[in-house]
Image: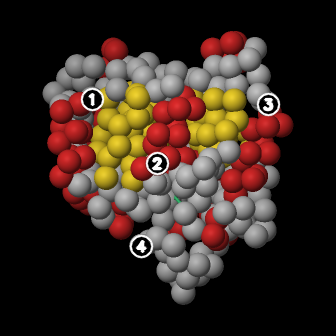
Amino acid sequence: MTPAHASLRRPRTRSFLMCPPTYFDVRYEINAWMDASIPVDTALAISQWEQLVAAYRAAGHRVELLPASPDLPDEVFAANGATMVDGRVLIARFANVERAAESGVHAAWHATHHGEGADGLIVQPGCVNEAEGDFAVLSDTILAGYGFRTSKAAHRELAAVTGRKVIGLELVDPRFYHLDVALTVLDDESDHIAYYPPAFGAGARRTLERHFPDAIIPTSADAYAFGLNAVSDGYHVFLPVGADQLAGELTNAGYQVVPIDLSELRKGGGSVKCCTQELRYARADKES
Ligand code: ARG
């Protein structure tokens, strides 16, 4: 089939916050993918992560770096640290004590790098939220997972901070413990998404079917290969390798797939999106 939408797809330049996996390790087990008895090759994790950074930069995106801390082996999963929408930031509050100190690192970075400017606001959370792990930002709404990490009360907090409607989606399968392993935003202007229905409760599935009738639905094999833990700029989809059928479908839908191998970080239960926090500045900041 001719990629009917190909001419409509266009990349939009992004800013990302990432943290090198200098101290990445699996020292504890807080999700179904982690096995502390399997050794981690940190040097390999670093070189794979550097390739992701290089791929983002080659596509014209800006990458900012967080300092890595020896006591925080999961800090590479920067998507979990804060959610920035229109320059307003809700800092994370982690469900597990092992990651609790990461929120302070993110709060300090945001305070130092853009402060509380005209439209800016940096909010410390009252409730548990694991940021972009469970929050998917669309053109004017936000999809929000709950069930394993982020609390439903945090959805209300996010709505208050951003002024956006937040749509709650229940996650039911421990392999898909964060929304960003079960659903990915392909185009945040037209709100085109892909998601894996079995990861969601019946009510959430109905909500997704109603709102996103043209969503791409991957195979189980592609979902288990972390195919939904992708990052898209509206044209390039930075996609974990191994999600082969999904790669074909994305190509047919007019996207340019950029394959990314983060096999070592998968031992921590994460891939491309988990490593990437998007910095969505307010329009005025963006132009400066
Ligand atoms: N080991 C980390 C945890 O369980 C992995 C986080 C992955 N991040 C994500 N955005 N899904 O918290």
- Judge by depth and name the residue closer to the eye, 164 or 196: 164
Pointer 1 residue: 253
Residue furthest out toward the right: 112
Q: Left or right of 28: which side holds 67?
A: right
Name the mark nearer the viewer: 1 or 2: 2
* Residue at 70%, 35% in the rendered image: 122
Look at discs 1 and 4 and give the one toward the viewer: 4
The colour scheme is: secondary structure
Q: Is 144 displayed left or right of 116 in the figure?
A: left
- Write down the quadrant of residue 111 in the picture: top right
- Of marks 3 and 1, which one's residue comes earlier in the chain? 3
Instruction: Provide the secondary structure element on which disc 3 rests.
Output: loop
Name the residue carrying label 4.
32
The quadrant holding residue 10 is top left
Which mark identifies residue 115? 3
Residue type, numbered disc 3: Gly
Mark in the foreground, 3 or 1: 3
As helix, strand or loop, the secondary structure at mark 4 comes to loop
